[in-house]
Image: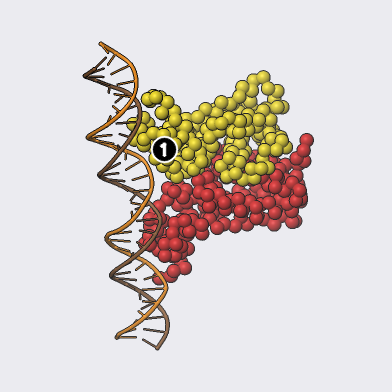
Chain colours: A red, B yellow, C orange, D brown
Amino acid sequence: MRDAGATQERLLLAARRRFAAHGFERTTVREIADDAGVNVALINRYFGGKEDLFARAVAIDLQLPDLSSVPQGNIGARLVEHFFHRWEGEPADDLLRVLVRTAATHPAAAARVADIFESQVRPLVAMLAGDEEATQRASLLATQVLGLAYCRYVLNLGANELTRESTHRMIGETIQRYLFAPLEA
Amino acid sequence: MRDAGATQERLLLAARRRFAAHGFERTTVREIADDAGVNVALINRYFGGKEDLFARAVAIDLQLPDLSSVPQGNIGARLVEHFFHRWEGEPADDLLRVLVRTAATHPAAAARVADIFESQVRPLVAMLAGDEEATQRASLLATQVLGLAYCRYVLNLGANELTRESTHRMIGETIQRYLFAPLEA
DNA sequence: CCTCCATGTAAACACCCGTTGACTTACGAC
DNA sequence: GTCGTAAGTCAACGGGTGTTTACATGGAGG
């Protein structure tokens, strides 16, 4: 009944939920502790403080799919499918939302997004489209994917319209273009 | 030297700057008052409180350009040009940044974005592409434009790469597709 | 069964922030 | 010139939040 590891996990889960829903500044450590069903002081005991808990909560892996066996013409669609699945499929859908929401106001989260971009997205794009234009293509891709996440999962803007099949296709084609279409006219 | 209107303007300007740079929760009314060179109490006297000052600070008009004389094939490019000019050209570039940054965590700002979307973007799209698919096309457009703003002006993600001429063209083509390309396969 | 340490609790501390009310100062009217 | 009112200042209050310290508790080892 008294398990330090389990309580740490419950605190992390509650923290991600709160941070994802209301951002860093608007969530209090007491709320998180209440959600987890433990005392507030344990946050400081186990993580050091609110900031450290936050850092642990946003230590997220994108789990980008293996695209080595996907035909080049289908990669855009495959990526969009992956992202939608990632955002809506699992119950722990807060994993990425917390990042997109909090990165707007919390420097550490913004740095984490930049890090994910550098270490996970850019290498993948480089592998697909070559090193030369990888940074620019990855930047373009980021604007569309993060924009989708920002509108749909942070602002709930036009949420009803963004799940339709045609939307997947339209955005998939955009990703495809950003990856492979010639950059110069 | 003692001009109520002028001090209110100075307070609004300082507020927009702070809110744009650090979001709503992380900026204090004392900072704003100091920037404006006046006493804190004036914020409450003139605006009622921090929330009301914020509401006034984000009362922004998109100033979407008149597209009636633009050939249909150039509308995407024209819109992208307008957005880049709007974001980078003027000194008061905080006007939109404050919205995109704060909407992630402040309900009033999120509501304001939704309102701008409904009252300014959707009608324009409806005029260009017809009422039938206007909502979906406007939603798609929003994901790309807000994503660009979010990456470039909130996160500073790949900022160096996103100003190039080719980027304008790539994103302009995306806008063009979201406005006019057939939605169904 | 007793003891000891990790686990968890409770209360208080220290600080910051938004707000308020009483006070002071400048400017215009007469 | 003086008087009144708007413009601006000052200091204090009240609430909330992250953190800390001292205390309680439960379970494993002797």
> Horizontally, is C3 left or right of A152 in the view?
left
> Horizontally, is D14 left or right of B151 in the view?
left
Evaluate whether residue B184 shows in this view: no
Nearest to the observer: residue B135 or residue A124: A124
Evaluate whether residue B142 shows in this view: yes
Nearest to the observer: residue B45 or residue A73: B45
Residue A76 in the image, given as x and y percentages of width and height: 70, 46
- Name which residue lies at 74% across and 46% down: A133
Instruction: Place residue B52 in its image quadrant.
Output: top left
Amino acid at dot 1: Asp
Within 10 Å of disc 1 (Cα), the crowding (few <14, some 14-19, many 20+) is few
Instruction: Place residue B82 in its image quadrant.
Output: top right
Residue C17 in the image, given as x and y percentages of width and height: 38, 44
Chain hosting mark 1: B
Report helix, strand or loop for mark 1.
helix
Number of marks:
1
Residue A175 in the image, given as x and y percentages of width and height: 69, 44
- Name which residue lies at 47% across and 39% down: B18
> Horizontally, is B93 left or right of B167 in the view?
left
Name the image quarter holding the N terminus of chain A: bottom left
Residue placed under numbered mark 1 in the picture: B34
- Name which residue lies at 39% across and 54% down: A31
The correct choice, above or below, for A22 with respect to B45 in the image is: below
The correct choice, above or below, for B106 with respect to A59 in the image is: above
Name the image quarter holding the C terminus of chain A: top right
Nearest to the observer: residue A87 or residue A59: A59
The correct choice, above or below, for D1 with respect to C21 in the image is: above
Instruction: Place residue B7 in its image quadrant.
Output: top left
- Name which residue lies at 47% across and 48% down: A23
Residue A22 in the image, given as x and y percentages of width and height: 45, 47
